[in-house]
Each structure stands twice: as structure tokens, then as C-alpha cells.
Amino acid sequence: MNSPTAICQLPSAPRILVRGTNWLGDAVMTTPALLRLREKFPAAHIALLTPEKLGDLWTHHPAISETIPLAPGENVFSVGRKLRAGNFDLALVLPNSPRSALEVWLAGIPWRIGYASPWRNWFLTKAVPARVEAVKMRKLTVAEIRRRTGVSPVSHQIKNNLETGRMPVLQTAAHQIHEYLHLAGALGANPEPLPPQLVVTPDEVETTKKKFGLNEIERPIFGLNPGAEYGPAKRWPVEKFIAAIRDIQQRTNCVWLIFGGKGDIALTGQIAAAFHASRFTFHDLSGKTSLRELMALLKICRVLLTNDSGPMHVAAALGTPVVVPFGSTSPELTGPGLPGDPRLRVLKSDAPCSPCFLRQCPVDFRCMNGISVERVVEAILQTIR
């Protein structure tokens, strides 16, 4: 592993720019690398260039000295000018895009570190080769899925035998957090994994509870996040969520907080409507919380039942147990938290076409249909014991 002095000569208190990732879940998975970077450079001013919508994620984070917002539609030249004013000694570029490397080159930052990739190596002073353990997410073609599942193009009506063989299990070193840790390691930081970490304060929690009328609740609070931005292939069926909620509620007498963005309002409303005439207590918060409020509310949940999504990663990084059905994506690559954490329960079927990384299932959705309500309920109950 190269030492930082082998790459560049840095002052004792360097000004380091980190070009952050663009999506909520990815941003959370960078936190182990950022913590290792802070560990290596305790006196550094570490600024994070991050999309404006993610800026509040980093409030109180111990690795970050400053956030620099990236506004929607902002062009590379204005970003370069903005960064140039920061007089940074070094840039660590976490995304693999050509644009992210071009931004720090335009800023005139002397040392620019990122993964090697065509169309961007010229903008980097050190292009880091890909890790040996790295695994790329490749979308399966419809033809591949049909071959693996035995579903013909004519008939997709396979209703039985939902668990028919398993994809090879990847090693934990394949997880995305190691991609970011490896880049930090190129600066001499310790590449050993840490759990992702986010911070909310007790005052934030109490203020948020009071705002949403939760401050006097004495029953256990459970969270539900039934949406997923990437597409329907990542979503456990809504009728299964409803059945699981009904069973869990009867066993625990909990209060449910339903989370989601503005695009999930119809979905969460469908779930809440299923229990309109019951005595179950629901707080449908979809589209009503800021990012900091979402974090504070996830922090107070005994457990979060969720799809593979940004809130899944946020909850795990706040120390909240999660139960998550995985279908079209791979928990070995992008699962919550640190692989092996017993508080984080990942459920998969044996569908031979999973993970396909597609937005919509072209056949019979066996990856998610093969995860039973009973398995999810049992995972929740085991988590809270």
C-alpha cells in the first residue's frame, strides 16, 4: 500500500476535498472510508462536495469539517470555480464518473486520487487500479433470466417451485464499502472495515418526536419503509407487507411509523388504508419529513422493516436493527451496515435469476414472491427479543 508521502507531500494540517457520491445509500456506505481518512489525518480540514439534497446527512459527522453543496444542474465549470476558492491540497474522488474527476481538475487541486477508468485518468494524478475482490453489478438480459428460470417467452405462469437454486454467494470483501476504503487506503489510511456511522443528537430526537406527536408513546415503535426509488423489482409486494404488519402488530402491540418520499404517498396510503378500521396505531410520514427528521425517527425505531433503499442504509448506520427482503439486488454488494452484523437481517429466496439488477421483473417476480410473510415476521420477532 502506498503511503501518502509516496503520492504527494502534504502539510501537517492538509486541506482535503472528498468528492462524495450522489445517492443516499451510496453516501452512507462511504462513511467507513471517511472515518478512516479522519483517523489518518486528524488535523486535516476535510470538506465534502455533496449533492445539495444530501447535505444534512453530514451534520455532526466526526469525519467532516465542511460540506460544499452541489446544486441540481450545476455545471462542471462553476463547480471547479467554487472548489478553487477552497485552496485544497488534495482531492479524493469517490465516484467513478468522468465528471467527478473533471471537477477537481478544473479546481486546480494539485493531487487528485480516484479509481482508474477510461475518459478520466488524464484528470487524476494517481489513478488507483481496481481491487482484486471488486465485483461489478451486471444486469442480466431477459433471455438469461428466462434460461435460468425455465420461463418461456410465451408463458410466464410459473406459480410453484419459487425456490429453484441459488446464485453463488460472494465474499464479504466484495461489499461496496471496501471500494471506498481501498481509495482511502491509497492515502495511507487503514483499509480495514468499520460499520457505517451517522449521527443524530438527543435534542434532535426529542424535537422531532414532539413535532410528530410521538413524545408520549410508551409502546414499542417499529418502522416501515415499503418503497424503493430504483424500481418495483426492489419492492417486496405490498400485500405481503400488509400481512406481515398485521401479524407483527397482533404479537407486539407496537406503533408503526411509515416512511417514504413524496413518490411513495400512494403506496404508504394503501398500507395505512388496509388498517383504517382496526385499532392499529399508524403514523404515515411519507413525504412529511426532512432528511434530519427521518434520521431522528429511524433512530427511535426498535426495528425497521424495509426494502433495499437509502433509508435502509441510514437506519443501519444509526444503530437501528433492520429486516430487509432482497430480490433484484445483492446484499453481498450493497447490503446494510457491516456484513455479518447480527442486528441486520437480510432475507433472500433461492431464485436462480437473483440478483438481476433490473428495475422491473420480466418474468414472475419469484425472487420476492419466494420470501414468505412468515420468514419476515419471524425475523422481526427474533430481532426484538
Image (cartoon, helix red, strand yellow):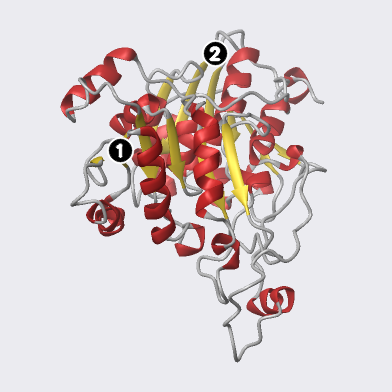
- Is 77 rendered above or below residue 50? below
Distance of label 2 from label 1 (alpha carbons): 40 Å
Residue denoted by label 2? 44
Residue 69 is at least partly visible in this image: no
Instruction: Give the residue type at disc 2.
Output: Ala
The residue lying at 65 percent from left, 55 percent from top is: 119
- Is 264 rendered above or below residue 4? below
Estimate the x, y position of residue 204 in percent, counting from the top left.
28, 19
Choose top left, top right, bottom left or bottom right for residue 382: top right
Instruction: Give the residue type at disc 1.
Output: Leu
Q: Which of 292 and 67 is in front in this view?
A: 292
Q: Which of 251 and 284 is in front in this view?
A: 251
Residue 154 is at least partly visible in this image: yes
**Is tag 2's residue or tag 1's residue first in the polypeptide sequence?**
2
Estimate the x, y position of residue 91 in percent, counting from the top left.
58, 30
Secondary element under disc 2, as helix, strand or loop, is loop
Choose top left, top right, bottom left or bottom right for residue 101: top right
Secondary element under disc 1, as helix, strand or loop, is strand
The residue lying at 57 percent from left, 25 percent from top is: 34
- Is 28 rendered above or below residue 195? below
Estimate the x, y position of residue 18 in percent, counting from the top left.
53, 30
Quadrant placement of the N terminus:
top right
The residue lying at 66 percent from left, 86 percent from top is: 152
Estimate how packed mark 1 is, as few (under 14), some (14 to 19) or many (20 or more) residues with alpha carbons within 10 Å. Answer: many
Residue denoted by label 1? 257
Q: Which of 96 and 200 is in front in this view?
A: 200
The residue lying at 54 percent from left, 41 percent from top is: 378
Q: Which of marks 2 and 1 is in front?
A: 1
Residue farthest along the bottom direction in this orientation: 154
Estimate the x, y position of residue 217 in percent, counting from the top left.
24, 23
